[in-house]
Amino acid sequence: MNILLISTPSYSTLFPIGNMPNLGLLSIASNLTGNHNIKILESFNKKTHFINQIKNTIDTLSPDVIGISAMTFQYETAKIIAKYIKKEYPVIKTVLGGYHATTMYEEIYESDDKFYFDFIVRNEGEKTFDELIISIENKLSFDNIMGLSYFDGVKVQHNKQREPLDLKEIKIPNRNFINKNDFSLFNPLQMKNQGIMLIETSRGCTNTCNFCVIRNMYQNSFRTYDLDRVIEDIINVRKSDIKMIFVVDDNICLDVERLKQLCKLIIEKKLNDIIYIVQCSSKGIATSEELSYLMSKAGFTQVFLGIENNENKNLKYLNKGNIINYTNLAIKYLHKNNIRIYGGLIIGLPEDDKKSIDSLFKFIENKEIDYPFIQIVTPYPKTKIRESYKKMNLITNETDFTKYDGYWANIRTKHLTSYELEYYKILKLKKNRLLKFNLNFLTLRTKPLLFLKHLFINPISYLIWEFSNRNYKKYFDNLVEELEKESNYYNVI
């Protein structure tokens, strides 16, 4: 069969600092059985003309089935794509998958949206999608495919839930389905965009954070791949001359000893000439000072650290527990080993006011968090935090999911309106010296010789980087101007 898999274009307001492949679609394509002609269309950062791109691809490939992956803020775009396909190519079967489909499959099929999606794959898709393709190809019943919902034109059926997959049965992604040159991420140490690929060493997280959708996707499970398989995957990426890998595990630090062992294997196999980026919890990093040392030696130069907030009452509300001491230790260990920190931080908690947000930004400066990544609480469907905000009547946007990207305020607090949250965040971002991508300082601190090389030996590269900085500043200036036009809150600060 001819199969087209589409990574839905993003209409997120978040400033694009790179373009990364959709590992989920890669894994689904790589785990299909049978002889199929498969095409992955990566459209994540495509803002315009994506319908033309899809049309040209369909006309060339003539797919029998089109799978569309979408997060919550991409769902409306996914629906536009599916509606277009059903109008222009009605015989093609459309399949929706991803986080939003997993949590909202009932609501989607209770609305007219069911006419655009023949099938919905819930939770992990490798086995369910493969069984679906086999059934379509051989004209078999869909009734026994676990994890599948479908609309046959008359009735809707939701099949039984599929249990979390045994990762031993998941094949290593075949990256020949994509063009490696299409993907890059800005590397501040090299002061340039650099080719990037994604790998995973585990799936899921057993923490109980009330704002997170991962528990719904992976059914509160945490499963790991064999480390030999992980090393083989890294070697495959390295063969394609890629020097940067983003490890997409939801919480790789749930098993600290396993992460230490992975670092040792990377060092032993001399795979530490690659730059690794990883997501970790503060508690996991703080558990062992040796871990940060090994990560540094293995090439883990950047860590996205789940700090969330600096106040105990807010951490308690988020169901994170009292992790402030862990956070302080984690920051200390990471900085000691020259690992740069992307600090995951959340504002817009029910009791947040100007004073508490000021306090958070002072915390950022005092702790020298290299790249603060600040999001406003987003009441994602079927999360505990959505239920809580709804009870307090603090949700200001319940239905326009296009703004559910963590950037826009879809809630208010007891003291700040949505506009005030947005405006205050942007203005603080502009004023805060650490949020202007002050890479001069960061590179000088972590790699002084490289800094001098780029500053004196390669002035053109440095000037390009400086120009990028100005564009980023201009981006923030324009956002502030936009918010000031829309509201009367420009005298808030």
Image: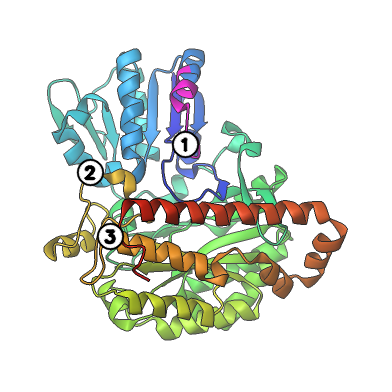
Please give the range of residues in magenta.
Answer: 44-55
Q: Are marks 3 and 2 in contact (CB under 8 Å)?
A: no
Is the image coloured rainbow, by chain, by secondary structure, or in one colour? rainbow
Residue 85: percent from left, percent from top: 35, 20
Residue placed under numbered mark 3 in the picture: 418
Q: Residues within 10 Å of mark 1 (few under 14, many from 20)?
A: many
Quadrant location of the N terminus in the rendered image:
top left
Residue that appears at 17% across and 40% down: 107
Reply above or below: 254 against 289: above
Query: Would you say 137 lies left or right of 196 here?
Result: left
Residue placed under numbered mark 2 in the picture: 104
Q: Farthest residue to the right: give it.
A: 457
Quadrant location of the C terminus in the rendered image:
bottom left
Residue that appears at 46% across and 23% down: 54
Say which of marks 1 and 2 sits in front. Answer: 2
Reply above or below: 202 against 259: above
Residue 284: percent from left, percent from top: 47, 75
Where disc 3 sits, the SS reads helix
Nearest to the observer: residue 155 or residue 90 = 90
Counting labels gives: 3
Real-space CA distance between mark 1 and mark 2, rounded to the nearest whole angstrom: 25 Å
- Of label 3 and label 2, which has the lower sequence position? 2
